[in-house]
Image: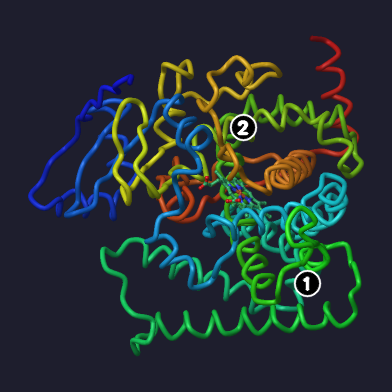
Amino acid sequence: MPTTTIVPPPGPKSFLGIRLARRLQRDVLGFSMDLARQYGDIVAFRCGPVRFFQFTHPDQIADVLVREARKFHKPRRLKRILGKWDGQGLILSDGELWVRQRRLVQQAFQPRRVQAYAADMVRAADRMLARWEGAGTLDMVAELHRVTLDIVCKTLFGVDVADHAEIRETVQTLQETAVREMGRLVPLPDWLPLAGKRRFREAIRYMKALLDEIIRKRRATREDTGDLLSMLLLSVDSEGDGAGMNDQQARDETMTLLLAGHETTATTLVWATWLLAAHPEIQERTAAAVADVLGDRLPTSDDVPRLSAVDMVIKEAMRLYPAVYFTSREAAQEVTIGGCRIPPASQVHLVPYVVYHDARWFDEPESFRPERFAPGYEDRLPQFAYFPFGGGPRVCIGKGMATMEATLILASLLQRYRLAPAPGQGPPEMEAQISLHPKGPVRLSIERRGGAGEAATRKSAIGAT
Ligand code: HEM
């Protein structure tokens, strides 16, 4: 029988792992970077009885996400914290439930249906840009979170956030609570009479009541209004028991899509606008490419494949500042990865941020060079050297939707405005929350791009090159 050599991986040690657990809670990104720098691609450490493994080589990432995917599930800690609002939604579920739900939810993400959302996306971007008229300086964090939340509410359950202003506040409360709880070694019980806990209880109550009401009305009419929720309610598991999902599951999936479907896109766009503001030449080049495709008209879904200059900026922004900078799994059974034996219940960390800043895969990894993502580049990279939407069976279900949305919003923005850092706005610091945020606001000066005069100058400048 062949024998496997089990190599104990290197890693830090501390008494009971207390110091390591604290760093992991408080500075997950800095900690993961330090581990990779000091110990390499495979690192192991312990916090009390729990074993942790960090993998930052594309081969081992492929092992965890694809080849051995079935031997892992989502970490119990994540389920305990995020499960309070996502319930058993797609991000947290595992096993048979996940397989069935993935089949059902996937039906709502057919490319044909997703493409139909382009008009809602462009309308929301257009409303935002009209609001910007004469504003001078704006915080991109507030603006881009607002527009992506508007879009997800419209495309998910057909609601205009303008008519339900409480949604914005509620979603913010839920996110702030999740961030706070993730940062605690031991989460506090929800019934405690603290102001934060009370706000959280109210936010959950509000969202559940809103979604239950929408689902009840939809069930009563059985109407396909074209949004994602319609499809969630109409989908049936033809490969399984032939039934659909119940109301509770539909609510969990809707909540999951609401939270997963706007924060990551917003953060990606905030970083992209900052990078363009800080690199005016690249911004002008990209704006000229947008003008070439669109002229003065609004974009449509058909334009997305032709807006490759915008796509390259978004990809490079996701490389430098990946919204999902960290992916975790728990071993459901014993498994060997990269010659390293992983006992059941061990925690496995994959850290895209570390991979994307590694000079083995990306030349000058700290430079903003969107042109590296010219067509064909990703095919030449090792598989899983770049995976902003994850991979394997649990690849992001909203990948196509997010790509289209980010492209349409950024193209619309560049068509109309020129961005520059506002006075006093330096490079934003990173804050590793649920996604990789800039710390505090990102204030940019916005200047309306000229009308016909500027377009003509730009055309002749392009013609001269
Ligand atoms: C730029 C935007 C986005 C990024 C970078 C992103 C990234 C990711 C990544 C990396 C995963 C895999 C996580 C893991 O393996 O643990 C994931 C999963 C997921 N994403 Fe996204 N996502 C984005 C937008 C969206 C949108 C727009 C939606 C839906 C409207 C969405 C819904 C989901 C769901 C439901 C999952 C769980 C899939 C499963 O486990 O079966 N995401 N996303």
Mark 2 crowd level (few <14, some 14–19, many ≥20, 10 Å Cα):
many
Residue at 19% across, 54% down: 49
Which element carries disc 2, helix, strand or loop? Answer: helix
Residue at 62% across, 69% down: 252
Residue at 27% across, 50% down: 24
Which amino acid, by three-letter code, is at mark 2?
Answer: Lys
Nearest to the observer: residue 216 or residue 131: 216
Nearest to the observer: residue 143 or residue 35: 35
The answer to whether residue 132 is visible is no
User: Measured along the vertical axis of the image, is residue 348 above or below residue 228?
Assistant: above
Q: Position of residue 393 (x, y in %)?
A: 60, 42
Mark 1 crowd level (few <14, some 14–19, many ≥20, 10 Å Cα):
some
Q: Position of residue 137 (x, y in %)?
A: 61, 53
Which residue lies under the disc numbered 1? 159
- In the rendered image, which quarter is residue 387 located in? top right
User: Measured along the vertical axis of the image, is residue 250 above or below residue 353?
Assistant: below
Q: Position of residue 274 (x, y in %)?
A: 56, 41
State left or right for residue 301 relative to residue 265.
right
Q: CA distance from mark 2 to mark 1?
A: 30 Å
Which amino acid, by three-letter code, is at mark 1?
Answer: Val
Q: Position of residue 452 (x, y in %)?
A: 91, 35
Residue at 50% across, 43% down: 70
Mark 1 and mark 2 in contact (Cβ < 8 Å)?
A: no
Nearest to the observer: residue 4 or residue 123: 4
Q: Residue furthest left?
A: 15
Q: Residue furthest front?
A: 1
Which residue lies under the disc numbered 2? 315
Nearest to the observer: residue 405 or residue 391: 391
State left or right for residue 189 relative to residue 377.
left
Which element carries disc 1, helix, strand or loop? Answer: loop
